[in-house]
Amino acid sequence: MAKCEPSDLIAESGEAFAEIPGARELIAWFGFVPHFHDAELFDIELSSRRSGYLKIRAFRMTDKVDDKGYFILDRHVLVTLTLESIGEISLSDFQLPGIIGDLVVMRSGNGFRVEWDSS
């Protein structure tokens, strides 16, 4: 089994993310593949009988700061990530709203695997 380096995961995540319907438009909007760092997960629906979703308030963090020293955020957007044919779920310490530390999309068989952590 090959060792997976963090940079490999990011590359795989970007390639897999770009395959999701609507993702290319989101990538164009942000100018990069988003990892949703510090984005707000404000709604989630999970079901074994129908599609589910994650609703996320996302933004782009610029390298500029305001007069109080906070990074200036732009490109605010509401993202709904539709989850079809949910096969496995694992949640711990879950509450809404939640702040995403990093969201990763990976290829898994014929579908995708979505993982995120909170900050």
Image: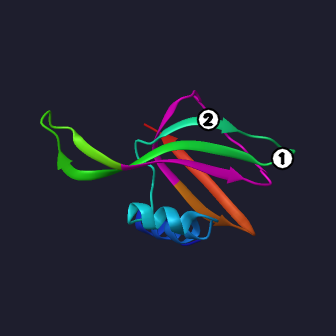
Considering depth in this image, is 27 or 106 the residue closer to the camera?
A: 27
Type of the residue with mark 1: Arg
Whether 22 is drawn above or below 81: the answer is below
Residue 62 image position (x, y, % from top left): 26, 52
* Residue extending furthest toward the right: 49
Q: In this view, does 61 lie to the left or right of 78?
A: left
Q: Residues within 10 Å of mark 1 (few under 14, many from 20)?
A: few
* Residue extending furthest toward the left: 67
Residue 18 image position (x, y, % from top left): 55, 69
Whether 101 is drawn above or below 17: the answer is above
Q: Mark 2 points at which residue?
A: 43
Which residue occupies 75% across, 69% down? 110
Which residue occupies 62% across, 44% down? 54
Which image quadrant: the C terminus?
A: top left
In magenta, the rendered stretch is 75-103
Which residue occupies 58% across, 68% down? 16
Q: Is residue 6 visible?
A: yes
Which image quadrant: the N terminus?
A: bottom right
Which residue occupies 25% across, 44% down? 72
Residue 87 image position (x, y, % from top left): 79, 51
Q: Mark 1 points at which residue?
A: 50
